């Protein structure tokens, strides 16, 4: 078991980043994309990035410790390391810590039931664009969804614009066009989000990154994307059933084909 120091800044302050990677077919899916995003986040947090070889070794060791499931998740954590008793100012010399864990995944989840959460995504915070160790807004939003009988939360930003789900990016389809919130809405630059946009271009489907309120997407077929669940249709939003679209299945197929 890896021991984390009591004065680790990730533990005390959420000062760090993580990536969750899909393990399937004996490989880490989109590993380089995940590491590149982690490195971009390090620049924002003024952290030195982990050595790529060390990160890969940690991920592989975690998979081996989990008995190499056929389909699983691997989480890499990169914390700012030891640094006092919770002081905001980091020590003169940062000694970041790398940890990894892996676990088996069951079958891909079915269509999601969404509820619009009251907690807002802070689009004005740079951490809204990071895989930060501090995820409390998302935790609260997901808890609100579960208490409402849904299984995922739709989060709006401080301007009332659609941002994301608690743990996924959001897309919708209208008039043979695909829409997703602009990154400036406080949206994480999701790995699967990029894959879907690329797949839409390959399929000749117009895709727009927009600023949209709930009314603009009302009644439209929706889907979510994340590294672990891929392309996941949305069955309902705030208790109202949503229509399906063959474009969602076509996009999911194109993304799956591109990953092979």
Image (cartoon, rainbow, N blue to C red):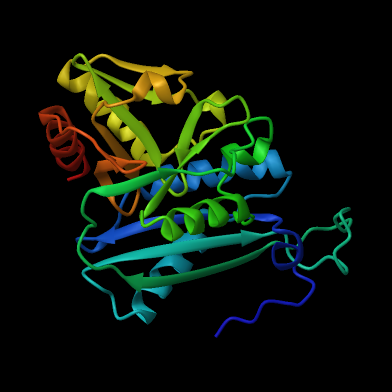
Residue visible at 44% across and 17% down in the picture: 210
Q: Is residue 165 left or right of residue 14?
A: left
**What percent of the width, then of the height, locates residue 82?**
78, 68
Name the residue rendered at 32%, 57% in the picture.
22
Q: Position of residue 60 (x, y in %)?
A: 39, 69
Depicted 228 relative to depicted 123: above or below: below
For residue 96, which quarter of the picture?
bottom right
Q: Is residue 69 above or below residue 159?
A: below
User: Please, which residue is most extreme toward the bottom here?
Assistant: 1
Please name the residue shown 37% across and 41% down the image: 238
Total tally of numbered discs in the picture: 0
Residue placed most toward the observer, 126 or 144: 144
- The residue located at (32%, 43%) in the rendering is 239
Q: Nearer the viewer, residue 126 or 122?
A: 122
Rendered location of residue 253, percent (x, y): 13, 38
Residue 79 position within the rendered picture, expressed as x and y whole percent measured from the top left: 66, 61
**Image position of 57 with respect to 211: above or below:** below
The quadrant of the image that shows the C terminus is top left
Asked if residue 188 is positioned above or below residue 197 in the image, the reply reads below
Q: Is residue 130 left or right of residue 93?
A: left
Placement of the N terminus among the 4 image quadrants: bottom right
- 33 and 236: which is toward the camera: 236
In-image side of 62 versus 158 (left or right): left
Left or right of residue 181, residue 63 in this image: left
């Amino acid at each position: 078991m890896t021991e984390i120091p009591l004065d680790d800044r990730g533990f005390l302050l959420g000062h760090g980043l993580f990536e969750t990677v899909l393990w399937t077919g004996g490989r880490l899916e989109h590993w380089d994309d995940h590491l590149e995003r982690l490195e971009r986040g390090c620049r924002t947090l003024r952290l030195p990035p982990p050595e790529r070889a060390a990160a890969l070794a940690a991920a592989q060791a975690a998979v081996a410790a989990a008995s190499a499931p056929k389909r699983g998740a691997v989480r890499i954590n990169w914390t700012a390391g030891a640094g006092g008793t919770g002081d905001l100012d980091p020590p003169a010399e940062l000694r970041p810590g790398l940890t990894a864990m892996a676990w088996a995944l069951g079958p891909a989840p079915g269509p999601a039931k969404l509820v619009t959460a009251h907690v807002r995504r802070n689009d004005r915070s740079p951490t809204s664009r990071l895989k930060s160790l501090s995820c409390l807004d998302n935790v609260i939003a997901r808890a609100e969804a579960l208490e409402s009988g849904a299984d995922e939360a739709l989060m709006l930003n401080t301007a009332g614009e659609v941002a994301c789900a608690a743990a996924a990016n959001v897309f919708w389809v209208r008039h043979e066009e695909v829409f997703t919130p602009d990154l400036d809405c406080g949206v994480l630059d999701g790995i699967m989000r990029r894959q879907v946009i690329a797949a839409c271009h390959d399929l000749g489907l117009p895709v727009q990154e927009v600023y949209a309120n709930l009314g603009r997407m009302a009644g439209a077929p929706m889907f979510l994307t994340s590294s672990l669940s891929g392309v996941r249709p949305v069955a309902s939003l705030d208790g109202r059933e949503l229509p399906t679209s063959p474009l969602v299945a076509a996009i999911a197929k194109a993304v799956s084909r591109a990953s092979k």
